[in-house]
Amino acid sequence: MVGAGIFDGDLLVVDKSLNPSSGDIVIAIVDGDLTVKRLIKRGSKIVLKPENPRYKEIEFKDGQELQVWGVVTSTVKKFI
Amino acid sequence: MFTPRLEGKRVVVLSNNDGCAVARSNEVKLLGIKMGEPWFKMEKIANQHGIIAFSSNYTLYGDLSARVMSILSTFSPKQEIYSIDECFLDLDGFDPQSLITYGQTIRQAVKHNVGIPVCVGISDTKTLAKLANHCAKKGLAGENGVCDFGRMDEQERSALFASIPVREVWGVGSRITEKLLTMNIETVEGLRTASQKTNHISQTRSPSTHPPPPKEKFNSGH
């Protein structure tokens, strides 16, 4: 997620009470793991976009369930 | 919650120093592993059935409990936190017709905002609310984890109570259960209908003899 300013080791602040909307950075459950991606709605499709050219987008089509765990509201950088 | 792939798996949490099982997922309960079972006794079975064991993290549980209680506190002017995973909410003055819907709202709020599944039991006394919660949790009555005894008719309630062992009543432990058994009181219904003249225990223990205002009770239950 380097494109969104989130780097390895950063601390994320997540609000579970928010309802995710398109454009939000979210923690999603993909194949039993938690992952941070940008949530994008394209027509009828929902896409999880890794803000990093090295990774591929994950598409969700009709019938596929996407579980959003929480919405990322801020990030904390550590210098040490 | 933080490891979604564990959902539906056989998981136990062990006490300090990984001594005994203090929490079990439903899948482990089905294997007949009891609460408090020492790890050294279950290790063999655990390996056979692929049970995943974790050390406990009480600081985390305390934190999550505080989050759940804080959400619950917004649903009633009066909250009584009874234990790390239980609290009573006073619903006196709320519309009795809509308490089930209210219970669902509360359940969803906790699930969405914290991620912990809870059940709601609603009745006229704390003892009955706890019993209603037990019924909701075990799927004996109510729907989707919410059970309101007030919305059941007398006949339904009698049949339900007749199917629940008396030891499930709050305050009825192993010794009172034994004593009640000698009086042929085996079920909640048996206790409720027991004659108060012949049975001094029912005077202090029968749920029907406590008359405080309506209470609602929560209990996290997976």
Image (cartoon, coloured by chain):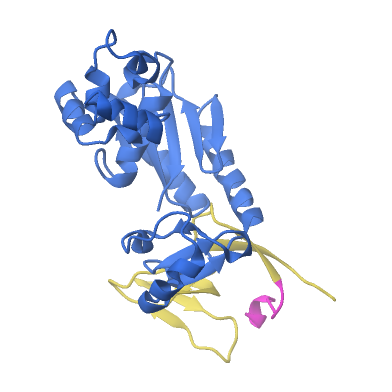
- Residue drawn at (37%, 78%) of the image: B48
- Residue drawn at (48%, 56%) of the image: B23
Q: Quadrant of residue B18?
A: bottom right
Secondary structure predominantly adopted by residues drawn in magenta: loop
Which chain comes out yellow in the rendered image?
Answer: A
In this orientation, which residue lies closer to the viewer: B107 or B190? B190
Q: Position of residue B56 (x, y in %)?
A: 59, 61
Residue B186 in the figure: left or right of residue A52: left
Q: Position of residue B31 (x, y in %)?
A: 32, 64
Q: Position of residue B133 (x, y in %)?
A: 36, 37
Residue A5 in the magenta stretch? The answer is yes
Residue A30 in the figure: left or right of residue B180: right
Instruction: Tell me which segment is drawn in magenta.
Output: A1-10
- Residue drawn at (36%, 66%) of the image: B8
Q: Position of residue B113 (x, y in %)?
A: 52, 51
Which chain comes out blue in the rendered image?
Answer: B
Residue B128 in the magenta stretch? The answer is no
Q: Is residue A49 above or below residue A72?
A: below
